[in-house]
Image: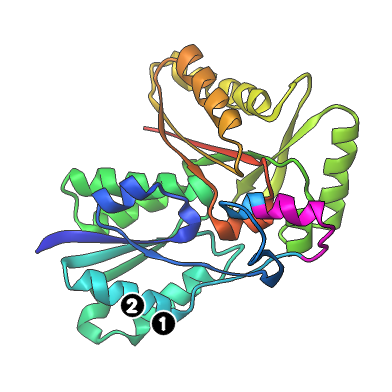
Amino acid sequence: MNKIGLVVDEAADLPKEIIEKYQMAVVPVKMDWPDLENLPGENTFQKMREAEKRGIKSFGKTSQPSPKDFLVAFKKQLESFDKILCITVTSKLSGTYNSANQARGILSQEDQKRVFIVDSLNASCGEGLSDLKAIDLIEQGKDTEEIVKELEKFVPQVRLYGIFEDPKWLEASGRISSTLANWFRRMQKLGLRPILGVKKGLVKAIGIKAKAKDIPTALFHQFEAKTKKLRNQGKKIRVAITHGDDLPGVQKLKEMIEKNLENTEVAFVNLIDNVLGVLVGPNAIILAWCKL
């Protein structure tokens, strides 16, 4: 039996290849948007664009996984691993972390001792970087208690930047206030690109980029500036990128990073999952990074 298995939630946006390689159990996050079900499109973002064209005014609703969802994942992994490490999306924006803890409490006393739960205080590729850090620590042979302590130190070090084409999706979901959404719109009218980030588990406005002709360029300049000191010191940086059905945009961003910045690796690029997708909308790009 393997030593440590991972349980993650869908909001981490990990590519299928990573999930399968490391035998992760993925807990689905739920989305309810009946108006989108019969619209054409290969993913949620294409359907959202079609909904806008047709004048559909509804917004998708999301809900956290139930304790039962986590219980199924825990039991599955406990059959193959000695201990389980579960990493969740930020508890400040979702009840997913609470559901995981409730599920753990349903297990037998012996099995409860085998399950460890960590709040990533992040989402999307920011959460995904915590998953990758856990993999690194497992491969280093550390025990579960050590890994949890290391992750608790690591979580505050992850930085996430996101630029969204239209803040209405986040506003409608209640994830950002109307005040912040209106500020975002005013900046856009002035030719500026406001950048949102995650601080202490909450979505915040963290900066503005001027003279950035598009989202990839704005994110590149933000990332370049914030990592310059570390890169000059020879520190290695790990990056993950997710997007709202804008493959050309993320390919451009990835190439800019790889061609211009030394000591930097792009760990993965992936589509934002359906549930986060209804919050950030089409053409959003999110970049997260951490020091290795």
The residue shown at (60%, 30%) is 249
Residue 12: horizontal and vertical position, in percent? 46, 53
Up/down of 249 relative to 122, above or below = above
Up/down of 254 relative to 268, above or below = above
Residue sitting nearer the eye, 142 or 71? 71
- SS type, badge 1: helix
Q: Which residues are magenta?
A: 47-58
Residue sitting nearer the eye, 258 or 4? 258
Residue 237: horizontal and vertical position, in percent? 42, 28
The residue shown at (55%, 72%) is 64
Residue type of the residue flagged with mark 2:
Val
Outermost residue, left side: 1
Q: Are marks 1 and 2 in contact (CB under 8 Å)?
A: yes
Q: Which mark is residue 72?
A: 2
Residue 253: horizontal and vertical position, in percent? 56, 25
Q: Is residue 53 magenta?
A: yes
Q: Which residue is mark 1?
A: 68
